[in-house]
Each structure stands twice: as structure tokens, then as C-alpha cells.
Image: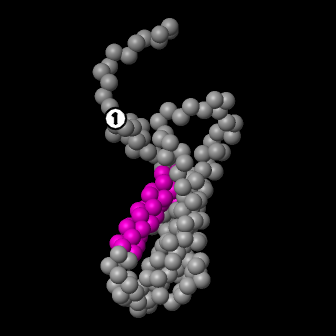
Amino acid sequence: AVGYEPDRRRFRPHVTVARVRRGAMPRRHGLPEPPRATFAGEALTLYRSTIGKKIIMAVTGLVLVVFVIGHMAGNLQQFLGPARMNAYAAFLKSTGELLWIARLTLIGATLLHVLMAYQLTARARAARPVGYQMREPQVSTYSSRLMRWGGVTILLFLVWHLLNFTIGKVNVTGGPTDDPYNLMVDTFSTWWI
């Protein structure tokens, strides 16, 4: 390189956290010690950071995936006959407060997940307000680029699913809504569902 002497030191991979001269302590010039960060302060700092938002999104996504797996396992009882499915539905209704705790946890996880996705997208767009002239993704996959639309699709399905089986109990064939087994059979025998 012109004007610079080449560096002859051997490269050692490392992470520099802070540069302080060895043996030197930062001078505080008689100032009092700064207050220690509280848990709430650290949590707020984590929430405001990009990596914190990604961690929150990952944890809430994991909560939702675990629920979907458990929900699927419960609904597979449909194949064991009407008595088994209806007994499972009755058991869920009998759990009372536990069911509401699970519902509130899922609502909170869903809201946090959507909020973090929105905030991260807004942050990424603000970081580069002018778009690329020609965008050719280098490392992202097709599924990762469509993930946002998959989330919107799942959210729309969730609204219909809750209206169909929980909140409104809508039977699109006009059949009974008080029998979980037959409600599911009627719903999934309709071609557009």
C-alpha cells in the first residue's frame, strides 16, 4: 500500500470489547459511581436493541410453534372417533383458568411476535431509505423472503379458525355447532376450507 508500512504481525482471531491500556484504570475525577442497572433497565435496553427484538421474536415464535405441535396432537384425536374427540374438547373446557392462562400467553406471544416483526422491518427500511436499483439476494432463501406473507396468511387463518371453532362456532354447512367432532368434519368437508 502506498505510504503505509505493511503489517507483519500474524493475524489472531479475536473480539475487541474495549480498548484500555494495561494497568490503567479509567479516571473518574472524584465523580460518584454510576448507579447499577436494574433488571427493568436491562430488559428495556434489550427490548430497544435490534438483537433484543430478534431474541424476543425467536422466543415468542418458539412458544407459538410448541403450541401448534400440542394443538395438532390434540386434534389428531379426531381420527380416533367422535367419542374421543368430544371427550378431548370437554376436557379442554373443564380446565377453566388454565385454559385462559394459555390463551392469554398465546395472545401475548402473538402480539409481541407481530410487533417485533413490524419494528424490525421498519428499522431495516429506515437504515436504507433508498432502495437498490437491482436487488439480487445473496444469502437469503426464497422462504425467508416470503416469511412476512406467511405470517399474514397464518394470522388470517387464525381469525377464521377462532371464529369457526371457538368464538362464534360457525358451521359453514349449517349443521350443529355444539358437537366438536361433527363441526370439524363439516368444516373440513367443505372444499374451500
Q: Nearer the viewer, residue 159 or 97?
A: 159
Residue 77 occupies quadrant = bottom left
In this picture, which residue range is highlighted in magenta? 47-76
Give the percent coordinates (x, y) of residue 99.
Answer: 44, 84
Magenta stretch: helix, strand or loop mostly: helix
Q: Residue furthest top?
A: 2
Q: How many marks?
A: 1
Q: Amino acid at mark 1?
A: His
Q: Is residue 92 visible?
A: no
Q: Is residue 146 visible?
A: yes
On whether residue 178 falls in the magenta region, the answer is no
Give the percent coordinates (x, y) of residue 78.
Answer: 38, 77
On whether residue 51 falls in the magenta region, the answer is yes
Q: Nearer the viewer, residue 47 or 56?
A: 56
Q: Nearer the viewer, residue 71 or 182?
A: 182
Residue 190 occupies quadrant = bottom right
User: What residue is disc 1 on?
Assistant: 14
Give the percent coordinates (x, y) of residue 101.
Answer: 45, 82
- Colouring of the image: one colour
Q: Nearer the viewer, residue 140 or 108?
A: 140
Please say if 21 is above or below 175: above
Helix, strand or loop at mark 1: loop
Residue at the image point whose x is 63% and y is 42% from the top: 127
| Left or right: residue 32 compared with residue 79 | right
Please say if 5 is above or below 193: above
Image quadrant in which the C terminus is located: bottom right
Give the percent coordinates (x, y) of residue 56.
Answer: 47, 60
Please say if 7 is above or below 110: above
Residue at the image point whose x is 48% and y is 59% from the top: 57
Residue at the image point whose x is 43% and y is 82% from the top: 181
